[in-house]
Image (spheres, grey):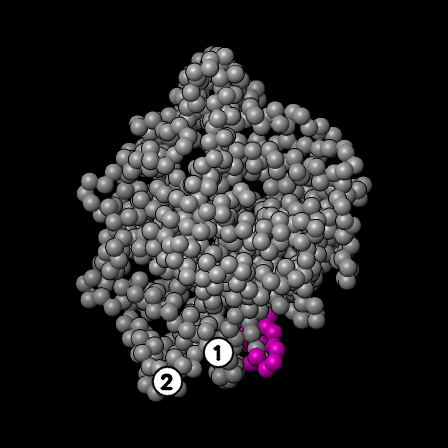
Amino acid sequence: MLNSGGSRLRVCTRCCRRVIKARPGHVRWESTAAAAVNDAAAPASGSDSAKLPIDHFTSSRHDDALLRELFDAPSNSRPFANFSLKKSQGLFKNRYLTSPDGFLVFAQKSLQRATRIVHRMLAASTTPEYQRLIRDLDRLSDLLCRVLDMSDFVRMTHPDVRFQQAAADAWSMVYQYMNQLNTMTGLSDQLGEAMSRPEVTSTWSEEERTVAELLKLDFMKSAVNLPKAARDRFVELSSRISDVGSAFVQGMEPERKEVTLPAHRFYGLYPGLAAQLKIRSNITIPTTGSEAAAALQSVYDEETRKEIYLAQRTASSRTIRLLETMLKLRAELANLAGFESHGHMALKDRMMAKSPASVMQFLLALRHHNAPIIQQELNELTQKKRERLAMQDATLQAWDRDFYMERIRAEMRSRVRFDDHLTAYFSVGTVIQGLSRLFDRLYGIRLVPRETLPGETWHPDVKRLDVVSDNGGQVAVLYCDLFYRPQKSPNPAHFTVRCSREILPDEIDEVGADLNGPDMPAFESAEQAANDGMETSSQDGSLKQLPTIALVCDFPKNDNAREPALLSLYSVETLFHEMGHAIHSILARTSFQNVSGTRCATDFAELPSTLMEHFAVDRTVLSLFARHWKTDKPLPYDLVAERMRVSKRFEGIDTEHQILLAMVDQAYHAPEVADRSFDSTATFHDIQRRYAHGPHDPPQTRWQGFFGHLHSYGSTYYSYLFDRVLAERVWRVVFRAGQDGAAVGRDNGERLKERLLKWGGGRDPWTCLADTLEDERLAPGNEKSMALVGSWGIRG
């Protein structure tokens, strides 16, 4: 089976769990309601001891002032500011994409080359032909993904609707072709034949063997070897799952859409919100959204909070029917493909946890580690309630949690002076400059501004940065589209629009023979044409596609031309997180696109990005760049330390919430789902009853109907927690939690790069982890290994 490459679009779990109030009307989900309030305050400290200990404000070897200026200078005076109207050289320098019409030619040319490769593979019969089969399959996948990945990005991000439509048409054309290939048994049979011949497999590299196993599993999961009737049913089920799943996510709704009560019952509600919602003597609050979350944090009356909570946690009957239909269709599909459950099928593919049992071992061990932490936090909340009500026998209810957590956080914030704002130390250019300095110290690479050609970018705000190594060689291209504009997706995302991959000499010869063919753009050489005009590198006689990455955020611009755009601490963490994905794509320079960069185990892919969040708040890392945009004074670290204390105040409660969701996800993709008696509501409450330390939801609630991640993360939701634990462990073991400047130590960076990052998906991730952490207990990658990871916990 040939994958569409969707795994290379990373819309991070991070952006799906928190709320950012970047501008009115845009709200993002968070795991606890209090997260929205954490960013509202800007604590400060005037103590001298808060100042950063090390002066690393200038790059030790390179002048990077231009990098900061590129993002911070007024738009009319920035370097490379002109958005040229000259003849387009193609998006990302892809010579086909000089206009919307180029997408059709790009798709057609790619399919012509793909068809020639398919015919060659189907005709393979000799040992040399089978020896190159994996390279042919990888090139076939690359040709299709070149179009699919580029089209996916353009239709989601390009501001011109003509480009969007042309990209969508190209995507549909190539996707249809790929689906046709996935119904052909011939390619699967040829792969099986190649893998059965020792004289073939003995010549393959470790990467080739890894790719072969991945492709074999993909074919198995696509049911390509089933009889035709069963295969047709498989295709039908896949289509229905997609349709029903989309209907579930898009149609999630509560049974009760709003709560209307007398205004006096909302005493304590934030005054501005109360005034906005009040009509005559009543207040009406929408059941879902930020208003209900704010009410649960602020309204004093417990019965009012209870009524809002029950409405907020009860999905409509229609929503539940759609959810359960999707789950049962998945169960049928898995059984048809020969798996015990959808969980068994999903975890078989590019996952470190190879079975549902392994996932539960991890979750149970993590729950055990988290138990004393959450019990302490719940005791504090209960005591707070008893003090407020002067009732020593009062018990904590589910609708009390957010209210009393916010009371305690508010007290923490009130003890801190507010004589400065944290954002003033984080202009966008300053943060990009800091990232370059960090990468220079850790990995010997840096970000260098590069003027773009006409038509190379899709908007004047987009800036190109070349990733350059110590010896001056170019290793990747990074396009930064960081600022808000209308109709742009609000979700931070990392796109790899072109993967690392070795281009073989016979490919260059093949393309060279077509240079003067009909509809071919003008290329200076066959080598340039082999990568469609996009960037390549040549080293030791090997030509490789350079990783080409687009980083998309929606940071608010500063309308004041004399001031740069400033970021909240949360936005700084977001940018570091996305750069973590980018650095994985940059450093994993594999020869096969199927295992390049972030094309690794799904429950491993968020490790580098989550790890970067630790760097974002490290004292020494911040000393590399964080200065006040106007006064040039260094950042007093107490500002960050206090903010982190507030945001992590109830980390145990948040961790248990995620553990329970991951357990629900596992239960909803277990073999029992196929039973006629399966009841998602009963299952949800049973998991709460068995595993929750805190107060349970009342039995009439049906919160699972709002768990939209069940559609996109089916049976893999645990990976968010898994990577948080791994990132915490790597941070403490490899970088010693930042002590004594370890966060910027080159030896530590090289250890992470050489043992983990550079492999992409081309090496067993358990082997990478065992080497990186120097812990052989991880090497087997079995249930004991998963339990060991869980036992480490998120808080050390």
Q: Quadrant of the C terminus?
A: top right
Q: Where is residue 253 shown, x and y percent of the image?
A: 36, 34
Q: Amino acid at mark 2?
A: Glu
Residue position marked by numbered label 1 in the rendering: 518
Question: Secondary structure under badge 2?
Answer: helix
- Residue neighbourhood size for the residue with mark 1, other residues' Cα within 10 Å, grouped as few (<14), some (14–19), many (≥20): few
Look at 65% across and 57% down and name the residue there: 463
Residues in magenta, as a range? 526-542
Number of numbered markers: 2
Q: Where is residue 792 shown, x and y percent of the image?
A: 49, 47
Residue position marked by numbered label 2 in the rendering: 199
Q: Quadrant of the N terminus?
A: bottom left
Give whichever of 115, 466 is nearer the camera: 466
Q: Where is residue 344 shown, x and y percent of the image?
A: 31, 55
Q: Is residue 184 visible?
A: yes
Look at 64% across and 41% down and name the residue there: 569
Marks 1 and 2, Cα distance to the nearest angstrom? Answer: 41 Å
Task: Give the image quarter of residue 533.
Answer: bottom right
Question: Secondary structure under badge 1?
Answer: loop
